[in-house]
Structure formats: C-alpha cells, structure tokens
Amino acid sequence: MIKRYFFLTAVLVFFQIKAQEIDSLRQDSLQYNSLQKVVLTGQYNRQSVDKSVFEVEVLSQKDIQMLAANNLSDVLNQTLNMNIIPQAGEGRSGIRQFGFNSEYVKILVDNVPIVGDEGYGNAIDISQINLDDIEQIEIIEGSMGVQYGANAVTGVINIITKKSGKHDWQITPFIQEETIGDEYSWFDEGRHIQSIKIGHNFSDKIYGNILFTRNDFQGFLNEKKGISYYNPSPEMENDSLRGYEWLPKEQNNVKALLNYNDNKNFKAFYKFEYFNEVTNKYANNVNFNYNPSTETVNPTANDEVFTSERFYHHLNTSGKIKQQVNFNISAAYQEQIKNYKGYSYRLKTEEKTKLEDYDFNTRKGFFSRGTFNNFFTSKKVNVELGYETTIDAGTASDLSPQNIEQRTKNRQLNSYSFFVSSEIEASDRLSIRPGTRVIATSHFNPAYAFSVSAKYRFKNNYQLRLIGGSAPKIPNFEQLYFYMVDSNHNIQGDENLNPEYGRSIFLHFKKNFWGKDYELKFTPKLSAWFLDVQDKIDLVIVQNNPLVYQYSNIDLHRTMGVSLRNSISYKQFRATAGIALSGESKVLESAGIYNDDYLYAVQVNTNISYDIPKWNTTFSTFFKYNGPQQQFFNEINEENETIIKRGKVAGYGWLNASVRKTFFKDNFEVTLGARNMLDITRVNTSVIGGGAHETSTGNQLLGYGRSYFLKLLYNLNF
Amino acid sequence: MKKQLKNLSIFIFLSLVLISCTEDDSVSREDFIVAFENPSENFSAEVNEINITIVFASAAPENGKITVTYNLNNVEENQFSTNPTITEGTIVVPFSANSEQTSFSITKENANISAEDPFIEFSISEVSLENSFPQGNISTKVNFAEAASLGGSISPEIGGPNEGNQVYVDLSGKTTTEVFREKWDLGFFSGEEFRVKLNASLFMMAASLGNVEFDEVNETNVESLQGQMAFLVPGSDEYVDAPSGNINETAIDEISITEDENNVYLLKLGNKVGTETPEIGSIAVAGEARGWKKIQILRDNNEYVLRYADLNSNSYQEITIPKTPSHNFTFFSFNTENIVTVEPQKQNWDLNFTVFTEVLDLPEGGFGAYGFSDYVSTNTLANVEAYQVNTSEISYQDFSTSTILEEKFELDQRVIGANWRDVFSGMYTDRFYIIKDTEGNFYKLRFTAFLNENGVRGYPSFEYELLN
C-alpha cells in the first residue's frame, strides 16, 4: 500500500515538471492525419481508402494508443459485427464475426496469415497478438477467397506493422500497469507490462528495429479463492472455489525487423517474431485424500500448465521489374508449439509432481504468396496474377480422449493456389474488378473462389460499391480425424469431408461531406450485406442401432444485415458512430429438427475524441453496445419430444475512456484510462442446452469488471 | 540530448520502482498428527502375531517417539508380549524423520484364552514432537477371539483407469479378493433354480435364437440381431441380466430339464479389459471386442451342460458344470474352456467393486443397456441388504445403531451402484450407506476417495464402522 502511494506521488512529480515546460511545447505532432488513410489489404498496391474498390475499415495507431490496447482483443471489441468471446477458463480469446467463430475469419500480419490452431490465419487466439509495432489494422468484411484463399469467409483482419523510423535512433521503453477489476498489487494481482523498442536507420536505405514486451497477467480471482484454497468443511465437499476465474498468464514477445528500400524499384524486409505464453490452469476442485485413521485431509489438485510458443519468419520483396511489372513476393516459415503439462499439486506442502507432458497442438509450415501486376501500360485495365502455397503440418488437440498417439499424430495439408483478377476502369466513374482463384490441395478436390467488385462514383461524389465474393472453408482436424469409439460411444471424424463454401455480397454507399475551410468533414456510410456458408460441417447421427455419430457436410448458415457508420471531424474534435442490425438463420439438418427463422440483433459503436493542443492532451472514449441476442435451443418436454425454444442472451456494453498527455516535446507520454467502465462481468442468458453430458448455465462470462490502466512511454530519439 | 538522457534515467528509475520488489513468505509448520491405522485387529487360529501400524497425517519432520498405553480386558499380562517391550506400563515406539508411519508388534503367548471377549485396548498417550497430537483412531482394540471387524478403511484394488479387477470385499473380516475381469464368462447358479448369468463387467449380452438347429446358426443369419445388441440401442436391455441381481431375471431363460425347451443363444462376449492410458481423470475400461459365440445350455439331472461353438462352426464343444453349494455360482471361462474359481464363498463377501452393465431409461424412449464403471454391487444372493442415507437427515458421525431403520433395507444389488460417485465432480459427499452383511452385522459406510492423489480414476476408498 505504501508503495502504491509512492508511485502516485512520482506521477504527480511528473505533472509538476510538465508545468514548468509548457511554453516550449510543439503541437504539430497532434495534427490528425486521418484525411489520407492509405490501405494495403486487398489492393494491388497501397492506395487511399477512397480509391479502393474494397471497403476497408482502418483502426489507426492512434485508436490503439487511446485504448492502450496491448493485444488484438482490446481493439476488436469495439468493432461492429464482431464479438470477442473470452474463454476465461482456457485463458484464450476467440472472435466472432457475423456470428461465425474464429475459424471463418482470417488474421494476417503484413498480408501473411499467422499460424493458428487450425492452420494458417485460422482459429487464432487474438489475446496472443501483440500490437506494439503496429501501423494500423485493416478490416474487410465479406468472403475474400480470391485475395486471401481458404477460410477468409466472413472477413479478413490484416495487421500492418511499422517498417520505418523518422530518427536515426529511436528508443522507446514503456511500462503499463493495469488493475484487473478491482484486483491490483505490485506482483500477485493485476496486469504488468514492460516493453522496449529500439529502432535505427543504418543508412537511408536500411532500417531495423527490435522489440521486447513482457505482459504479466496475474489472473482474475473474482469469487474464486486462489491456489491454496480448499473447502475446509468437515463434509469434504468440493465447492469449485479454488483457482481463478480468469487464468493467470505471462506472455513474452520478441520481434525484429530489417527493412531495405533502394528508394527506386526494390524493397525488401525480413521480420522475425518469437512469442511465448505460459498459462496456468488451476483445478477448481481438489482431491481431499482423506485419511480415515487420522481424520485429516491432504488435498491435492490436478493443475495444468499450457505453454504456447510461436516462431514467425517473413521475408518480403517488392518492386518493379523492367520499370513495368509490379511484384510482391512473401515467403514465411512459422511454427507453433502448444505444450501441455499436468501436475499434481499438494496444497499443504506446495509440492508439484509432474504427471503428463506432451505437445497437444503443433503446427509448422511454409507459406509463400506472390502477386504480379501492371503487365502492360494501360490506364483502363490492370491485371494481377498471383500464386499462394502453403505447407501446413501438425497435430491437433482432442482427437481422441482415450489415446495419446491419436491425439499427437502428425497430419499434413499442402495447398497450392493460383489467382487472377483484373481492375477495369470502365469509365472515370465506374471501375470493376472480377477475379477467381483455384485452390488445389493434397487432401480435397480442387476448390474455387470467385469475386466481382464494382465501384461507381456518382456525379455528386456519392460512392457506391458492390462487392461479391466467395471462399471455401477447409474442415478442421477434429472434423476430419476425431476418433472416439468405445463400448458407450461412437463418434468419428470423416476424412472424406468436403470444404464448406462461403459466399457474400456487400453493398456500400457513402459520401464525404466537407464544411467550409475543410475544417468539418462528415462521412456517412450505409451498408447492406448477405452472407451464407453452405455445406457447413456438424456432427450427425449416421446410424441409430448402434448409435454412431460422424461429421458431415450438412448445414447452412446465413446472415444478412444493414449498417450505418458515420465519422465526423471538426477542428480538434472527431467522432464515429455506427449502428448495425443483423439477422442470422441456421438450417440445421444435422439436428433433424430446427427453426431457421432469422434472429436479429443490434450493435452500436461510437468513439469520441478531443485534442487540446495547448495541453498536449487528448481525451477519448470508446463505447460499443451489443444488443440482446436470441438463440434457439432444444429442450425435451414431458412427452419426451424435442422442442425448440427461443432463448436470449442479454445486451451489454463496453465503455472505455482515456486521457493521453505528452511532455518534454512529446518525448514522454502518459496514458491514463479505464476499461469496461460499465463493470460487465457476466451477462444473463436463458439459452440452456440439455444434453446428457452438458451442463446448463444461467450466465456467460465476458469481462473482468471495471479496470484502470496507466501507461508511461518514453521516446528517446536522436 | 543531455536532457533527454536525464529524462530517460528518471523513466528508468520509475520503471525499476515498479518492477523491483521482493516477496517474503514464511511457511509455518504443520501440526503433526498420528493415529492407529485401524480401529481393531483380530488374532485368529492362524494368526499369532499382529503388526500394529501407527500412521501420520504428514511425513515426520524429525526423529521422535510415540508413547502407547494399554488396558486389558480378560487378558493376562503373561498372555502376550510386544516389540518394543513394555516398560512401566507403556510401549515407546520410535519413528524417523520423513517416515509416514511406524509400528509395533504384539504376539499371543498363550494360545488358549477361554474367558469371554478377551481384548487389549491400546491408546496413544504422547508424541515427542512439538505441535503434535493423536487424532482419529487414538486407540485400537486387539481381539484375542474371533470378532467382527470394527471397521476402518479399505481401498479395493480395482486396477486404475482400466478397472481390470472385480474386487470382493468382506466387511466383517476386513479382507478383499481381486479377480481379473476376463477370468470368467458365465456363472452357473448354485442355488435352487437353474439359472446362468453373464459377465456384466465385460459388457456381455445374450439373445435367444429360439428353438433352432445349433449348427444352422451362422454369422449371416444373426447379422441384424447383432446390430441390436449394443449399448444405448432401445430394447438392448432384453439382452442383459436384470441389474437388480434378481436371479430369476437373467437374459438367458431358466434351464429346463426338457432338452427341447432350451433355446440356442447368440452370445456377445463384450470387450476385453482396456489397455490404453486415458487422460487423467478418465477411464478406459473397454478394450477390443471379444467376438461372438453360440451357446445352448441343458440340464443333466442336477448339473448344467454347456454346449458352445464359434458362430460359423459346424461342430460344438460340451462341458458338464456342477453346482457349487458353498458358492453362489460355478464359473466357466471360454478362454480356458474350463471351470474357474472366481468369487469367495458366498458368506465371505458383502460388496463387489466392478465394471457393470446397467439399464437406462433412454431419452428418446424405451430402455437400453449401458456400461458403468466404478460400480459397487451387494451380495444379494447371500442376503446382503443396504440403504442410502442422506447427510441432510443425519450425519455420518451421528449415525448409530439406534438410528437404523430396518424397513429401509433393500435386497437389490444396485443400492450403492454408481450412486456414490459423480464422474464430473468426484464423490458425492452428501450420502452414505448402511449395510447388513452376510452375518447380520450392521455397518455404516462412506466413500472417501474416487481418484488417487494424482487425480487418476480407478482408486476408490471407503471407510466403515460397525454399529453396535
């Protein structure tokens, strides 16, 4: 406690130092540069948002700074049509886009999909994606199979990293302290982040940087009582109160970049990343090990440690061949190792005995992607050719609960794609971009993806975009290879499954309105969409006597909706406000009985920020509201019939606010803020499933309550 | 530049303040608790020396001594000796650091004590270490004549997560007998009726094929029936013995003296004992399938005649199987093609820990067979009765002879069954059982473990106490 006061005093001292130097502050760094947003995702070459045929949403570095976001889940929970689904009991965070899970959205870093539990860019734990070297995050909604291949079904999230520095040397250490709900102490509670980044321009052509970040999350106890707890009642009844509500974990991240730019026709960069995460899962119940002779207990708990390691190497070259053809080639090698260790922990003596140790999910492989365009000098037509190769080998978890060899068996999937698209300037108002891709794999029949996009600029500068696309979704290892057959069960994967097939069509209508002197800018955008996934895989009963389950291509999921997104900026004030109404419908042939009515839900997001240049201070708030969601669930009535009922998950909002202030000619930055100000931990749900081995819950865990953060960052530039 | 460096050093200083700090924990020493392992021990005709074990709740922190005193009841000082020997009315038992138990022995010197109810009661009076005391079984009763065990704790060795053993437990004798589950296939009833039971621990099933020619049965003409003979299939309850243990409700009909009335049966041999090591906390009781047989059972006066063959075989084997009056059943194995010893004598066991075939009320309607692990059946054929008590009515500690409700006893081997355990959270701590054993003793019994210390399935323990 004393130390906490000391820290606050130290912060106040800084504010006083600032007061003496206020006159010498420069303001230009706070100029907002959103007017020239440039995007990369889905483009032939970098270009401005307004010129892009695709509708790209950009989360800027400033947004990330104001959220003091340290991983991807901290920013995406403010994005429309997305939900972050924390799996607090596993220490993971998944993502849902348009109601589809993270196997349907593809996550890329610098256009290269990152290795995940189910292949490249797929089923990524977004709480493992560190944002300390990020330029911006680009999001495209809709199926992008032509541009990004399989599994880019509901959309693409492309994280663009920084590749240059303005100064000769740039040394940036920062520390960030966060409370977790109302839990905080120097070591055993809260979140503690330390980071340092060093950037250097070796010459006017070569830039390099190296970054280290440690993120120590001490978990969230909430109602739980920690590691040493067991129910002391003489009945020796387990009360599930041991351990943590959110698992503690520590992440260490090293990144390095070397960038070469000859300032003419050739660029290259090499990027390396090493990521390590250790998550401790403490059993909620103990074995009492009652000794009837002495009437004493000697509790032990089956604790687990999950260690994730990820290596990322990415070499990229781009430029022009013979002053004409643009090329951009990436080659990446990535590796992910997820290790499981099981321990028996003796609570009284704090002894740990290792029981099990194996890698439960490893993925490694090679990825290469190349694009070539501008083959001939025409202002009207540009053609892009591209290839993509992935070699993806690995094991998947949970393939057979009874057999460790099955669980850790290595499988490999190679895929080779070729794609072509063309951008046609039909007139100075209309541009069209058709494209197609063929995907050949070592396992499935060839799959195809198509896209056609059109952009029309009306006379009064209204822009209309119509974007259609498709993408296959490759079955995951569980669906292909799961095996659990014993005297009571028969559940099997099917190696002959086909890829699922996603299609989408989006319509965007927008205009930039400018006020006098260009100080006011207002951009409303109206969008509408339809997206469906056919042949969706689910478990079905293939034989009744005896009962046999198998994965099968059987279902159809559909979603459609409309949204209105507005952004406005006036002098030092800027704001965005969006609202989306979307409906989901599921044709569940797998269940035999289903209701495919569309279920609608509303999402609202808004962000307001205000700069006070005189104080070098920015105030900002972010708010996202996820309206109540309906879901169908099955129940067995008194006549032993399965009936379908509508349940509801209550609505909830994420409200964040922060103040960021710079000192000493912007060399020192302080960001102070609060996350989850509405103090959301759980939301009520009346969706209760009733299977033989399922348990019903009355609420869903979403957050760890209102938390505060303080980030101190120093820029040493020379 | 200089100023920047100065500012940077302030920043670094602050960072160090944030990340440098030490924790110091001091671990307080646990109490050292000791007790007799068992509340009672028996001399018998065969046993003249007993080792009396004193167990510790935790490993001994250092060397020490336990002082034991005693009281005699109808036993003379010269009728026994101990090691270490008695000095000044006490026995001083040493123990060493890190040990988890110690012991002393008592030898019966005069084999014939005619007095009524002769016993010695030993008590722990002192432990030499600081913060140490006896708790639980602070005394133990050594009976010089045969007497029902006062109880204690038993950990039947059912064999870990494969649960390869059936374990027969005799409460009054405090003994266990392990039998590998694959040792036998059919049990021929030794009582009045002519009945044959299946080895439910292997998930065996039997379906009547009617009065057909034995040799005409083959794989082709039983194929559709085989599909029905599986767990969770509605109607599969027909092919298993009644889980209640009622001998008149076996899957195979009563064997008739009239040869024609004895149908041919399709026999599913179930599964071998599992050999895989499952995830910690899970089980792998069922191994590979053991195949099928066709059988017909006949009577030759007071003996059974088993006729058996592989499904496609045109010939068969026959074996005569007599009743064994001292036991519930005579057991036969297809592996040895002979009679095998399985159960102890029928009066010498009360409980059987086993994998078991139950019948479930299926959610989609009808009944079906289903395999259960960690099952505990009672010896109903020797009239062992039992009932379950909920701790909301009375606690295990408070339950005594006076709270026994005779009308609650059930003659059904499922009373304990799998009701004592919950595969998700372990044991139910809100219930215990009252058992009336084969000799008419009443015991209260509660389960104390479902998993071992490392969380592995297949390591049950229970404690029990004689009610008198």
Image (cartoon, coloured by chain):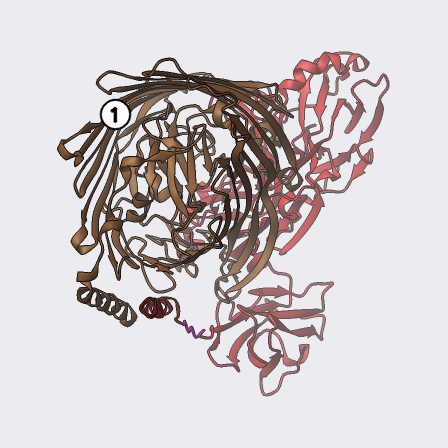
Chain colours: A brown, B red
Q: Is residue B310 magenta?
A: no
Determine whether, in the image, residue B177 is placed left or right of residue B20: right
Q: State the extent of the magenta-drawn residues as a range.
A: B22-27
Depth check: A683 or A431 in front? A431
Determine whether, in the image, residue A16 is placed left or right of residue A433: left
Q: Is residue A78 above or below residue A667?
A: above
Please state, as top left, top right, bottom left or bottom right, where the N terminus of chain B lies in the image: bottom left
Determine whether, in the image, residue A113 is placed left or right of residue A224: right
**Residue under numbered circle 1:** A525
Spot occupied by residue A134 in the image (x, y as percentages of width and height): 40, 45
Chain letter for mark 1, please: A
* Residue B57 visible in this rendered orientation of the protein: yes
Q: Which of the 4 image quadrants contains residue A682?
A: top left
Q: Is residue A252 above or below residue B101?
A: above
The residue lying at 82 percent from left, 33 percent from top is: B337
Magenta span dominant secondary structure: loop
The residue lying at 64 percent from left, 61 percent from top is: B146
Spot occupied by residue A388 in the image (x, y as percentages of width and height): 57, 29
Looking at this rendering, what residue extends furthest in the bottom direction? B88
Mark 1: secondary structure: strand
Q: Which of the 4 image quadrants contains residue B299?
A: top right
Spot occupied by residue A473 in the image (x, y as percentages of width and height): 51, 25
